[in-house]
Image (cartoon, helix red, strand yellow):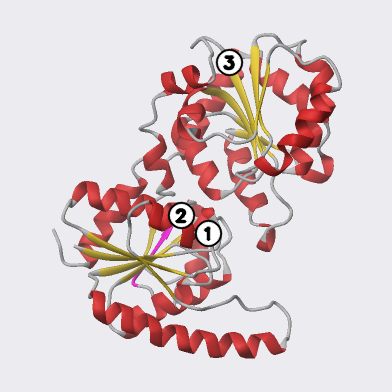
Amino acid sequence: MRIVLTGGGTGGHIYPALAVGKQVRQEIPETSLLYIGTTRGLESRIVPAENIPFEAVDITGFKRKLSIDNIKTVIRFLKAVNRSKQLLRSFKPDAVVGTGGYVCGPVVYAAAKLGIPTLIHEQNVIPGLTNKFLSRYAETVAVSFESSADHFGGKHVLYTGNPCASQVVQADRSKGFSSLGLAEDRKIVLIVGGSRGAKAVNEAVFQMLPKLSGLPEAQFVFVTGESYYEQAKQRISGGDIPPNLQVLPYIHNMAQVLAASSLVVSRSGASSLAEITALGIPSILIPSPNVTNNHQEPNARSLEVAGAAEMVLERELNGDDLFRRITSIVTSPQRLASMREAALTLGKPESANLIVTELKRMGGRN
């Protein structure tokens, strides 16, 4: 089978595409993959490291207000469509998968115009502009949240969940504990503000520091983000360091550490929530207010409504309230169990398989 993957800009668009690529290679080992992205996005560095052939088109996003730059973007789009058609004619894919980001626009549009089956995947509850546009041309729309289907009326919509969930469920929790030097009976409270960290989340942790030793049954693993790590070390070293606190700039084996965690405090990006729910981890979610369409808040609210998480808006975040919430959950076995069950009902560990099954149908492979 020959599959083109496209999606870019941020990890939230790239990693779902890579998860689909891994799954299709597992199911059909002779599969050939091609990833089409941009040189501006993270995909230009992440994808080649996964030994997937990478090609680039030149495209930028539209401004949300009238701008002369939008005229230039239209010209870039048309050129990118022509470049995409060249790449597609050369590679001859059975199907094209788009996972969001503006690079998907010309690639999926070009595929549709060439009569190549296309599938787009929407990670968030509220669809992005690119996927709303592409839904007119895509053969199948796959969604991470069941409620997203209403935004794609009349299309062939599949509730697949997020394919990132399919990789994390294979993680070895024992290795997560051992990588942190912890016994497997410890309750890990993992606090992470995303791959780059989050200043507001870090500040709340600093405010909590004097209280942490008062919750000895919990082991706090605080991931600052690499850019904030030195500052965090200075802030924390200025006082008594709680014995149940570990401070790290980044976690490379995040899936394993997640599998070992009893509670996660994090942002509410779609891929993170897919991993949390697939593993059935209770969470306290702090949506980032600095994302397009504020899409992290509806993501978080969907888990809160289901009883799998508590949501705290960043403007209401402070150390005292966060510590109270953590304590309330960690010290209640019943609460941990009920939140875990609720999270598992939302998890779709079979997500990548569902998408690959659809690709086989679309590509005429049974």
- Relative placement, left or right, of 53 versus 209 is left
Label 1 crowd (10 A; few <14 / some 14-19 / many >=20): some
User: What is the secondary structure assignment of the residue under circle 3?
Assistant: strand
- Which disc number belongs to residue 46? 2
> In the rendered structure, which segment of residues is drawn in magenta?
139-143
Q: Quadrant of residue 140?
A: bottom left
Tell me: residue 289, above or below residue 94. above
The percent position of residue 73, horizontal first and vertical second, equals 59, 85
Q: Which residue is mark 1?
A: 42
Tell me: residue 61, above or below residue 350. below
Chain-order first, disc 3 or disc 1 = 1
Tell me: residue 286, above or below residue 135. above
The percent position of residue 227, horizontal first and vertical second, equals 70, 44
Q: Hey, what amino acid is under mark 1?
A: Leu
- Relative placement, left or right, of 58 versus 322 is left
Tell me: residue 115, above or below residue 313. below
Q: Which residue is mark 3?
A: 187
> Looking at the image, which residue is at 47% across and 52% down?
146
